[in-house]
Image (cartoon, helix red, strand yellow):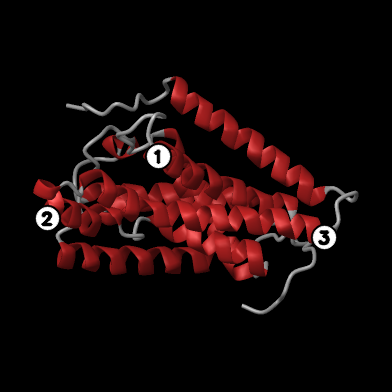
Amino acid sequence: MDTRAFECFGDSHWFAIICTVLAAAGMIRLNRSPRVTQARKQQANTALAVILVLAVSADPLLTWLRYRGAEDVALAGRLVRETALPLYLCDVVSLVLAVALITRRPRWVEIGYLWGVAGTVQGLITPTLYFDWNTPEYYAFFLQHGGVPVAALTLVFGARIVPQPGTFRRAIMWSWVYMGGVMLINVLLGANYGFLNGKPAVGTMFDYMGPYPWYLLTLQAVAFTLYGLLLLPFARPTGGMPVADIDPAV
């Protein structure tokens, strides 16, 4: 039974969703505005990158602090190892987008856009979060899971660093690399990062994808379909929106 304090689609959840939407709109507008200098835009984007890195870094620290009591030292260490290392897709894409926000490299932007919107938004809508807004875990969770789609949309629709030809193929390749690597790490650690070795203990969209391990096939079908839909605006012969001020290096 779901005994967590956080209520999905409760007041604290809607607050986080609304803040995410407003932040995305604000960052896109800032990056598109001709009245804002490029230096100021980069300062805002760098600040968002720092927030993403700090949010990822906070998870193991907060897990340790919550369970570090004298009788729970071993439990705290096990929980950090099995649940709080930066191995979830949302952790990885947070770091990818942090690099993309600072370097503006197209290859980092494209995978951050697809993983961030197709993947992390699911975590924003159906969070695997146990703590409500009277805890630091709540803010760390939503700074990350809200910050990721904000960063992805900012780079693509604000800075106009759009996906280039071959993005779909590259995204599938990197998705398989992530899945294979993390599934192996899960076996070695006895963990379930990415929920690739079992479903979450709380209700999520995974519950509608079939039993283990078949839901992994459904997950890939859904993810790759979303990749295709997210790339549709850029599938025109002209390459879609113009690419602005990017470094062509990978």
CA distance for labels 1 and 2: 22 Å
Binning the other alpha carbons within 10 Å of mark 1 as few (below 14), some (14 to 19) or many (20 upward) gives few
Above or below residue 13? Residue 129 is: below
Binning the other alpha carbons within 10 Å of mark 3 as few (below 14), some (14 to 19) or many (20 upward) gives few
Quarter in which the N terminus is drawn? top left
Residue sitting at x 17%, y 64%: 189
On the image, numbered disc 3 is attached to which residue?
Answer: 38
CA distance for labels 1 and 3: 33 Å
**Quarter of the image where one finds residue 3:** top left
Among numbered discs 1 and 2, the one appearing first in the sequence: 2
On the image, numbered disc 1 is attached to which residue?
Answer: 136
Q: Is 8 displayed left or right of 238 in the figure?
A: left
CA distance for labels 2 and 3: 49 Å
The amino acid sitting under disc 1 is Pro
On the image, numbered disc 2 is attached to which residue?
Answer: 74
Q: Is 106 displayed left or right of 179 in the figure?
A: right
Q: Nearer the viewer, residue 73 or 39?
A: 73
Q: Is 82 displayed left or right of 149 in the figure?
A: left
**Quarter of the image where one finds residue 74:** bottom left
Residue sitting at x 86%, y 56%: 37
The amino acid sitting under disc 2 is Ala
Above or below residue 226? Residue 91 is: below
Q: Which mark is residue 48?
A: none
Residue most extreme to the top:
11
Above or below residue 192? Residue 248 is: below
The amino acid sitting under disc 3 is Gln
Residue sitting at x 45%, y 25%: 12
